[in-house]
Image (cartoon, rainbow, N blue to C red):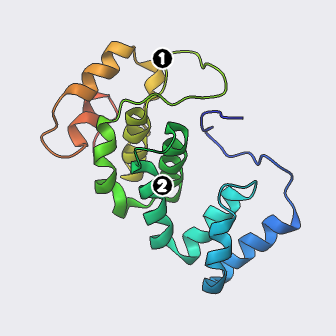
Amino acid sequence: MRLPPQRFVLPTHYYTLVDALIEALGDLGSASAADELFKLRGTDYEATATRALSKIAPERLATELVATAKDTKTDSYFHERALVSLRNLSLTNRVRDLAPLLDDVSPIIYSRPMPGPEWRVCDRAVISIATMLGWKQPVLLRCLRPEQRNRAHRRKPLRPTEPRMEELGMGGPT
């Protein structure tokens, strides 16, 4: 089922020995297991494999997530999942690579309609970048009226990403 990301991660399956083994590979830093863990992305074990890969091969994982987020042929839902993974893993060295996504107004399509204005890739990019930079906890864009959100996205920043965040009431660097 295609749902927006939640504030906290709940497993979509029961925690099993496989999850424990995947986490152990990450904790041990088993570089030889990286290729096998990349194969688990896109399965029920994606979240566990992504966390383990962030310990084993963070650069390779970041490169793959950024490529997925920026790929124009990829479904917008997968853009969102890549942005959320980058945010959760705090891969701040890739924030500059995400700046072009601030102009992507493609709607994110979920299994069922969500209340409020529909999420767009640029909305998820704004929240991901603000969180990755360690700024104040961002205000959910659903609380803004669509015309406020559109106006904030249209303004030209003086510096990459910072003024847009401040315009949305998300604060600046702390």
**Mark 1 or mark 2: which comes first in sequence?**
2
Picture coordinates of residue 108, whole percent (x, y): 51, 31
**Residue drawn 34% across the image and 21% down it:** 149
The N terminus: image quadrant: top right
Picture coordinates of residue 60, whole percent (x, y): 48, 71
Name the foreground residue: 25 vs 60: 60
**Residue drawn 25% across the image and 20% down it:** 151
**Residue drawn 43% across the image and 30% down it:** 120
* Classed neighbour count for the residue bearing mark 1: other residues with Cα under 10 Å, few (<14), some (14–19), many (≥20): some
Name the foreground residue: 144 vs 53: 53
* Classed neighbour count for the residue bearing mark 2: other residues with Cα under 10 Å, few (<14), some (14–19), many (≥20): many
Picture coordinates of residue 40, whole percent (x, y): 69, 64
- Disc marking residue 86: 2
Q: Secondary structure beneath disc 1?
A: loop
Check if mark 1's residue and mark 2's residue have beta carbons within 8 Å: no
Residue beneath disc 1: 117
Q: Amino acid at mark 1?
A: Pro
